[in-house]
Image: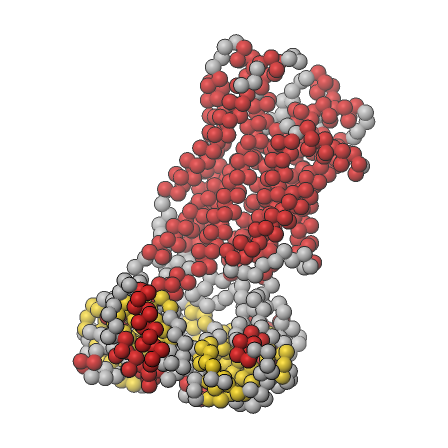
């Protein structure tokens, strides 16, 4: 049987080279796309799987409930929570807090300084919850003292070269001496928790003078590891009300998220989570593979007339229909295996570029047994689906009719349906890709409420207040530097918030209003070119401006003050007055709306210097660098453009848009092959009719118009189906954005034009080829 199959495939390849190559090309393209997507999905779903007992690890998060029914879920939790719940609940084996170091830290050793911002501050249980191997030092107790620091292999090599770092002393911010107690393996790239160094929580208290016993302040991630066999739902129910007895706000509940879901199912309100992209691209992979399968069906049946005699002779000599079905299915699977071999080569060639596009370190994964099973499944399913209809169709030929030259009268409806499905899927992908592109362009070009261009910011160390006044006075002297200010955060990702705000006329419904909070310096409003609606910004002309507040429009609406300017306002018990209202501006992704914001001066919290510069960017930056080096010689000069950070918001969406567009183009190409197959089938069926028309002097344009009219009907049906599917799919997707486009008719008209143009070219090419063929060649056996 295998020998017969091999002979059949080789004969088919030899006698019908062009069609065989198109079949293999279509299948290889579909399998290549599917493999690339499966490799990416395998990577995304493999995040954090390297941790031991990951099923026992959970992230604790808060559900903040509002009077209007909205629920705001955040990972940030109070400082005392981790240790408190460990003492209270025996089901919890270990617990840890975790926070990223606030800003850059300067690590100095042997007269060399290294500015690092990839640090984590954790409790000692961190190393018992997560499986980050210790490669040097005490595995059981990586922190062997309160002044210990753990370095990754990368940072240890960077700071100490090949010498042993254990026991070496690192000076942090020229204030604190910490001894290297352990070296930890670099976190894998598919780890949700990344870091370059780890410090104990005592460092947090020393450096930032933070009250770790404050139940009202949400700052830290809390992770727990439960005893084996504990049901998380029961523990989650017990935790729900735990925080209510310890805070003024009674609308907060605790909940648990399995750490295995931490990467894919992010609960932060500003994040959709990679699971959405995983599902979308799995769907895209299925669609492309189906398009490739349908393409094979159409191309295989398009040449059925040429294989009819082969089938008839096999039946005459005793072949049974089941045997023929198996033969043709085997032929399809064999073609799929050839396509797989080509696809593997293509994947190896395309994978580096695909890795860059997805920002992932992807590999083929031939050592991954699950991936190999997936590939085997893809090959088998593709072969069976592709060969099912051709096998049934070809095996149904009746020998006597074939020998007599009687054409089959069965309907070509199924092949037309397959082409309609192919084009519907391709057109839907085309429309979705276009709308995604339009939405991303809209977000990039939207007015955010301030001028994000030509604004440079520098992150300072924790000696900010001793350096900043002199630095600002020198920077403002540079030609081309227009404004200089300071803040605790740049207006691209505000993270500080509080409920503890009081004002005259506050009602019970206003108690659960969460206000974003930002600490800014003089000239902040001017530097960012924000619009002041009422009052003024912070200015030295009015003294220290301490306990003065600037609010945005959304906050003014929530405060519902009769005369906002001069009205008293209290935050954390500190009373002051409102001196200005600024127009709403976006300080987070445009996926979310503008929240109520209060700005105040608090120099102790300042961390960034913002600088408004002119057009001669390189010259001005060089002068800023010189001022920096003379004022802060121990700290390397590093800067960022605010506009680049704004683009970062949509980096994931932009990457996915490009990938989506690439796969859409491939789907269209494969669909064109399917259309080519159907046109070939119909023109071959009508070849005798056309030859006779030509003999009797008929104009081939009439034949062309008749065929074109029939195909245009099916393509327009494909458009109608695709338009409905893509419209509702994109409306659902756009609901995730606070600012969005309205879906216009243009993209639908464009999809219709492109699909009709492709149809016109395909039909014209086939009719023209047939028109050039002499009638005698077609009718010679009649």
Q: How many marks?
A: 0
Q: Foreground: 556 or 588? A: 588
Residue shown at the point (33%, 65%) measured from the top left? 618
Is residue 111 shown to the viewer in this render? yes
Please state the horizontal and vertical placement of residue 518, each as a whole percent of the image: 33, 75
Where is the C terminus found, in terms of image quarters? top right
Residue shown at the point (54%, 57%) measured from the top left? 355
Please state the horizontal and vertical placement of residue 477, each as a whole percent of the image: 24, 75
Q: Is residue 417 left or right of residue 618?
A: right
Q: Foreground: 526 or 292? A: 526
Please state the horizontal and vertical placement of residue 571, each as a whole percent of the image: 31, 82
Residue shown at the point (45%, 64%) measured from the top left? 271
Above/below status of 428 relative to 762: below
Where is the N terminus found, in terms of image quarters? top right
Above/below status of 636 relative to 291: below
Please state the horizontal and vertical placement of residue 229, each as a whole percent of the image: 66, 75
Residue shown at the point (33%, 70%) measured from the top left? 622
Q: How is the image coloured?
A: secondary structure
Quarter-of-image position of residue 373: bottom right
Q: Is residue 370 left or right of residue 673?
A: right
Q: Is residue 456 left or right of residue 320?
A: left
Is residue 253 shown to the viewer in this render? no
């Amino acid at each position: 049987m295998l020998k017969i199959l091999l002979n059949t495939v080789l004969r088919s390849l030899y006698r019908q080279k062009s069609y065989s190559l198109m079949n293999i090309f279509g299948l290889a393209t579909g399998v290549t796309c599917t493999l690339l997507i499966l490799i990416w999905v395998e990577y995304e779903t493999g995040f954090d799987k390297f941790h031991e007992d990951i099923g026992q690890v959970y992230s604790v998060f808060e559900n903040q409930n509002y009077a209007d029914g909205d629920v705001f879920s955040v990972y940030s939790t109070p400082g005392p929570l981790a240790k408190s719940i460990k003492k209270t609940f025996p089901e919890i084996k270990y617990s840890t807090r975790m926070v990223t170091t606030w800003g850059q830290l300067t690590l100095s050793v042997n007269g060399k300084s290294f500015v690092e911002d990839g640090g984590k501050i954790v409790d000692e249980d961190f190393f018992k919850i997560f499986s980050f191997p210790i490669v040097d030092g005490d595995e059981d107790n990586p922190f062997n003292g309160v002044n210990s620091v753990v370095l990754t292999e990368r940072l240890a090599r960077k700071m100490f070269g090949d010498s042993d770092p254990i026991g070496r002393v690192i000076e942090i911010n020229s204030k604190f001496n910490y001894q290297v107690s352990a070296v930890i393996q670099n976190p894998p790239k598919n780890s949700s928790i990344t870091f370059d160094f780890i410090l104990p929580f005592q460092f947090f208290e020393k450096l930032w003078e933070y009250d770790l016993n404050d139940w009202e302040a949400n700052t830290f991630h809390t992770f727990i590891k439960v005893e084996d066999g504990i049901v998380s739902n029961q523990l989650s129910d017990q935790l729900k009300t735990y925080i209510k007895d310890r805070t003024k706000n009674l609308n907060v509940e605790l909940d648990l998220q399995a750490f295995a879901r931490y990467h894919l199912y992010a609960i932060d309100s500003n994040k959709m989570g990679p699971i959405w992209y995983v599902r979308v691209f799995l769907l895209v992979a299925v669609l492309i593979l189906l398009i490739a399968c349908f393409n094979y069906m159409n191309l295989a049946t398009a040449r059925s007339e040429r294989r009819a005699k082969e089938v008839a002779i096999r039946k005459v000599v005793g072949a049974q229909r089941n045997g023929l079905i198996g033969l043709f299915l085997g032929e399809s699977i064999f073609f799929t295996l050839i396509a797989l071999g080509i696809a593997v080569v293509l994947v190896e060639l395309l994978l580096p570029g695909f890795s860059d596009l997805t920002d992932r370190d992807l590999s083929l994964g031939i050592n991954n047994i699950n991936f190999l099973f997936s590939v085997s499944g893809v090959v088998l399913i593709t072969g069976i689906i592709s060969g099912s209809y051709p096998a049934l169709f070809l095996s149904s030929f009746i020998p006597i009719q074939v020998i007599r030259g009687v054409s089959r009268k069965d309907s070509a409806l199924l092949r037309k349906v397959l082409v309609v499905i192919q084009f519907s899927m391709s057109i839907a992908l085309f429309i979705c890709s276009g709308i995604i592109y339009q939405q991303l362009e809209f977000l990039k070009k939207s007015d955010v409420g301030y001028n994000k261009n030509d604004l440079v910011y520098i992150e300072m160390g924790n000696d900010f207040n001793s350096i900043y006044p002199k630095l600002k006075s020198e920077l403002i002297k540079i030609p081309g530097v227009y404004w200089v200010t300071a803040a605790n955060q740049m207006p691209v990702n505000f993270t500080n918030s509080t409920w503890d705000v009081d004002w005259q006329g506050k009602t019970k419904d206003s108690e659960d209003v969460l206000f974003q909070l930002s600490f800014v310096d003089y000239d902040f409003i001017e530097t960012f070119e924000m619009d002041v609606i009422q009052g003024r910004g912070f200015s030295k002309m009015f003294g220290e401006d301490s306990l003065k507040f600037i609010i945005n429009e959304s906050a003014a609406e929530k405060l519902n003050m009769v005369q906002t300017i001069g009205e008293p306002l209290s935050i954390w018990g500190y009373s002051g007055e409102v001196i200005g209202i600024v127009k709403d501006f976006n300080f987070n992704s445009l996926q979310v709306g503008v929240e109520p914001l209060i700005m105040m001066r608090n120099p102790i919290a300042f961390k960034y210097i913002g600088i408004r510069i002119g057009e001669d960017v390189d010259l001005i930056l060089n002068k800023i660098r010189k001022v920096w080096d003379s004022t802060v010689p121990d700290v390397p000069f590093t800067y960022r453009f605010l506009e680049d950070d704004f683009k970062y918001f949509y980096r994931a969406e932009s990457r996915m848009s490009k990938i989506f567009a690439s796969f859409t183009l491939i789907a269209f190409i494969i669909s064109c092959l399917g259309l080519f197959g159907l046109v070939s089938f119909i023109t071959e069926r009508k070849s005798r009719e056309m030859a006779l028309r030509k003999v009797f002097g008929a104009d081939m344009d009439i034949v062309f118009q008749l065929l074109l009219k029939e195909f245009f009907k099916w393509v327009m049906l494909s458009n109608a189906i695709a338009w409905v599917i893509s419209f509702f799919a994109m409306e659902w997707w756009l609901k995730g954005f606070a600012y969005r486009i309205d879906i216009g008719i243009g993209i639908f008209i464009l999809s219709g034009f492109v699909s009709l143009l492709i149809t016109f070219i395909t039909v014209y090419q086939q009719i023209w080829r047939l028109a050039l063929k002499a009638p005698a060649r077609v009718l010679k056996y009649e």
